[in-house]
Amino acid sequence: MLSETSASPKRARPRLTVDGLHKRFLLHGQGGLEIDVMRDLSLTLDAGECLVLAGRSGIGKSTLLKMLHGDYRIDRGHIRLHFEDGELDLETLPAYAWHGLRRDVIGYVSQFLRVVPRVAAVDVVMEPLLARGADENEARQRAETLLARLNLPERLWQLPPGTFSGGEQQRVNIARGFIGEHPLLLLDEPTASLDATNRDVVITLIGEAKARGAAMLGIFHDEDVRERVADRLLPLDDSLGARASVTQNTQETLS
Amino acid sequence: MKKPALERPVLLDVQDITRLYGPGKGCEAIDFQLHAGEVLGIVGESGSGKSTLLRVLAGMEAPDAGRVVYRRAIHESEAARAGAGEDVLDKGELERDEAELDLYAIGEARRRALLRLEWGLVHQNPRDGLRMGVSAGANIGERLMAQGQRHYGQLRATGQEWMRQVELDPGRIDDAPRTFSGGMQQRLQIARTLVTRPRLVFMDEPTGGLDVSVQARLLDMLRTLVRQLGLSVVLVTHDLAVARLLAHRLMVMRRGQVVEAGLTDQILDDPQHAYTQLLVSSVLTP
């Protein structure tokens, strides 16, 4: 046992394994058109690492994140979460069990904020904590701290984000995504419409998440950001199967 | 990291419910379970049978076939949650140790007691849920009095507290609902229903007849109340945007039958059935 530890210090069990994932859309309104968006995708993700999906747009990167978050159904293949005391297969998880899983385990930062009318930005951000029964003052404080770190002007905190700029909305969304400190985080272009200063803040947030052991799967089109956050890259190509993952230093082989 | 506890007890067990007024009119062979803490949306166009189903579930209309079973055993552990409120509950008609109630097998009196003590119903039209001639305060207090609360000062204080909670001016506690706007009436109906902290709430198009600006406010309020009170909800709506905001899980109905069910995001973002795809793709986004 001792030798095992010393031989491979990073031999932690993965937090997530994806095995032979398929996704096909059948469009009844288009005469039964079938679109294969994913064929036989597999990956593993460890605690404390950020795996970045790469490949041209339309290749299925967001689709994968949506399947992991339960937004899309899993047609074929396995998505398995590993815990100290057991495993959880997402493809067979009943609908009611997803509510708690999303609240406590799987977090998601999408590209666009789904605006709830009339709800103030700070309330949007603190909601994931309140859903867990957190103290309201404490949740508000943490939300304000995050919004301040993301340089969202304080005068906007009490306003509903519906009228905010794209970059401002995205920062609200990022704060909401990171506040819950989920052990598995799905990041769909969280830096897309941010300026350099705020990109740096997001990179720091990702670093902090890694440090506390969060496993992250992300899409970043900005090469600079990708280089700074990725521990590994997972290129998706037109065969729609992920090739063996490569390290970030060899990313020039990717287009 | 430990495996999260994802199991949730079944609160309502709906077994093969059929209620038909004619071929394809009503609902047929409906089978599902509502778990504690879940908000289940039933969506579909008018005439799909969703309102008929809700009436059967809420104890207002006996089905032709099938059973609606309410599993109340789990409540005992949660009873402490209600705190002081529990003392004043007169549960005489409902045996406390009864774990399961078959809604249409128990008698009318006990069904009424259940609706009064542990369930709540929010009608689309607030006039159906309110007593228009008596004051707002009396409307809120009525369900509490039905549970045995008699202390006038306390009833009034609770009434004012709930008016604040639903953003009505507590100074209007003595005004009759008929002097309120539609949006205010709907909020009053919600206060009247939730004041007894029901475990299970049925809502029939709760934002249906309201102006869009008023709808948004009500939706946010409902979301907050559901979370704060830990409600389990069956919500009927034809509005997919309302369903997206409020419901964890959806059932899509067409011609009396459920054509598709699943997580709200799955139904709206990855619909499988031809009818659901049509429904989702027909929504206008401004």
Image (cartoon, rainbow, N blue to C red):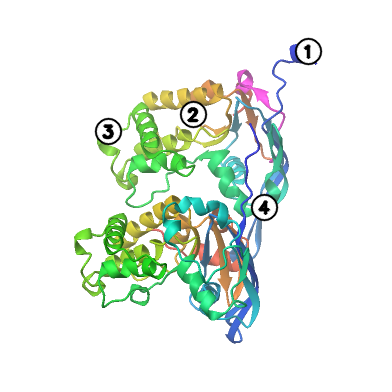
Residue at 37% in and 40% down: A169
The chain carrying label 2 is A
The residue wearing badge 4 is A24
Quarter of the image where one finds residue B5: top right
Residue at 49% in and 75% down: B112
The chain carrying label 1 is A
Residue at 30% in and 59% down: B154
Residue A207 position within the rendered picture, expressed as x and y whole percent measured from the top left: 51, 22
Q: Left or right: where does residue B222 sit relative to residue B51?
A: left
Residue A210 position within the rendered picture, expressed as x and y whole percent measured from the top left: 55, 24
Q: CA distance from mark 4 to mark 1?
A: 46 Å
* Badges 3 and 1, same chain: yes
The residue wearing badge 3 is A154
The residue wearing badge 1 is A2
First along the sequence among labels 3 and 1 = 1
Q: Left or right: where does residue A195 sit relative to residue B157?
A: right
- Nearer to us of marks 3 and 2 is 3
* Local crowd size for mark 1, using a 10 Å CA cut-off: few (<14), some (14–19), many (≥20): few
Secondary structure found at label 3: helix
Q: Which mark is residue A222?
A: 2
The one of A189 and A223 positioned closer to us in this rendering: A189
Q: Is residue A190 above or below residue B201?
A: above
Whether residue A242 appears in this view of the structure is no
First along the sequence among labels 4 and 3 = 4
Q: Is residue B235 above or below residue B230?
A: below
Q: CA distance from mark 1 to mark 2?
A: 42 Å
- Nearer to us of marks 1 and 2 is 1
Q: Which residues fall within the magenta stretch? A: A239-251
